Each structure stands twice: as structure tokens, then as C-alpha cells.
Amino acid sequence: MQQKLDAFARLLTIMDELREQCPWDRKQTFQSLRNLTIEETYELADAILDEDLDGIKEEIGDLLLHMVFYARIGDEKGAFDIADALNDICDKLIKRHPHIYGDVTVKGEEDVKKNWEQLKLREGKKSVLSGVPRSLPAMVKAYRMQDKTKQVGFEWENSEQVWAKVEEELAEFREAMDQELPFEKREEEFGDVLFSLINYARFQNIDPETALERVNQKFKKRFEYIEANAPKGLQEMSLAEMDALWEEAKGK
């Protein structure tokens, strides 16, 4: 434990030194760091998807640096420091785990998640959805909203009902397309299809964001194979010629 505490103290010391001595670090604000933090978060997500343990370790460090950076800026503003942030999360974890730090009994993971949402409402949250960040990617946001409303009983009984909803939404989207309804209506119906598919994926314990990203990577790898093995420029090739290389790539 002491080794871990020493490492964290070292990072805090370096952050103080950078903030005081480095022109770039002195210039940073909450706003200027925001996009960089988002980028670092996605880099960690990539490393996790690739099961790159060294990469995960590196990206954890990068994100920890950002958290310490925000805390240092907060301290300069007289608003909070890193101790305040750490104590807040410790207090929250203890309060929201009464089955560990209190006398509540749970049967499993689902009970824990339901208790968590109920405790948040008692703390003053106006909605079970209030904790879902507005800037989350739409697919992740849909999954999180569905999972959160499930905790208060707003949920289908079984996956067959969810699949029936998928088919219903597909039919409505197809009807909107066939009738050449206004673009906004077609867009809405397409969104309904995606939302229902995400819900079905959740029932099957499939993370739709991860599933789609794996397909993205597969598509990228196969298309890059076409580019690398094309006997001439892609613009000069027929679709059939490119498709033949695509089929080759599938066997690689």
C-alpha cells in the first residue's frame, strides 16, 4: 500500500512543479483539457478492446494525470483539491454500498444496481436518467438509459418481446421509406430501429458499442487489404474486382 501511496504522491508533486514551471501546463484550464481528456478516454477504450495490458496501464496513467490536473486547477480556484474529490467518492461508495457498510442484504448484482439507483433518487436526483451524461455517444447513451430504467421496473419481461419490438420498428421504418415520408420522419423511424436493436443486444448481454467497434475494425482490416493488394488504382477497379479481394481478405 505504501508503495502505491508514494507513487500517487510523486504524481502530485510533479503536477505542482509542471503547473508552476511549464508554460504549457500553466496555460491549461478546465475547458482546454476537456477534449484532451475525451481523447485519452478513447485511447484507454481502444487498449481495452485490444486487450493490450501495457496500453491499458499507460492510458490509466494518462487519465490519472488529467484527474490530478483538474484537481490542481480546482485548488487554485479555491473550490476543491484532490483530497476533497477523493473523500467525496469514498463517502459516496460507502453510502451506496449499504450491503457492505450497513445492514442491507442483497441476493446478487441486480439487487445492488437497483439499490444504487434508489439511493441516488433519495439523494435528490430528479430522475434515474439524470446521471447519464449528455455528451455520451448516442449508442452508449441508449444502452445506459435502458439499463437504468430497468432498475426501477421499466423493462420488457423477456427477449422475445424485445425482438417483436425490433420487427415492429423495422416494419415502420420500411413503411416510412416506401411512402417517401419527410426526411425527419424517416430519420426518427431509423432511430427507433437502432434503439430497439440496442435493447435486444442488452437482453443478450451484448455490448452494442463493442460489437460495432469490432465490426469497424474488421471492415478496416479487410478494406486496407484491398488497398494493399489492388493491381491498379481503386477508382479504376470494378466492384467485382474489389469484392474478390474482399473475399480473399476474409480468409486472412
Image (cartoon, rainbow, N blue to C red):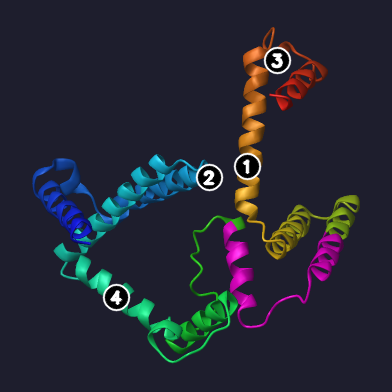
Q: Which residue is mark 2?
A: 49
Q: Quadrant of the N terminus?
A: bottom left
Mark nearer the N terminus (1 vs 3): 1
- Image location (x, y in percent) of residue 209: 61, 52
Please tell me whether residue 41 is drawn above or below residue 115 in the rendered image: above
Q: Nearer the viewer, residue 195 or 155?
A: 155
Mark nearer the N terminus (2 vs 3): 2
Q: Which mark is residue 88?
A: 4
Q: Amino acid at mark 2?
A: Leu
Mark nearer the N terminus (4 vs 2): 2
Most extreme residue toward the bottom is 103
Few, some or many residues within 10 Å of mark 2 (<14, 14–19, 20+): few
Single out the mark in the foreground, 4 or 2: 2
SS label for mark 3 = helix
Few, some or many residues within 10 Å of mark 1 (<14, 14–19, 20+): some
Mark nearer the N terminus (4 vs 3): 4
Q: Which residue is mark 3?
A: 235
Mark nearer the N terminus (1 vs 2): 2
SS label for mark 1 = helix
Q: Which residue is mark 1?
A: 214
Q: Nearer the viewer, residue 130 or 224?
A: 224
Single out the mark in the foreground, 4 or 3: 4
Where is residue 92, by image quadrant?
Answer: bottom left
- 12 to the left or right of 103: left
- Image location (x, y in percent) of residue 139: 61, 56
Residue span colored magenta: 140-169
Q: Amino acid at mark 3?
A: Gln
Q: Is residue 72 visible?
A: yes
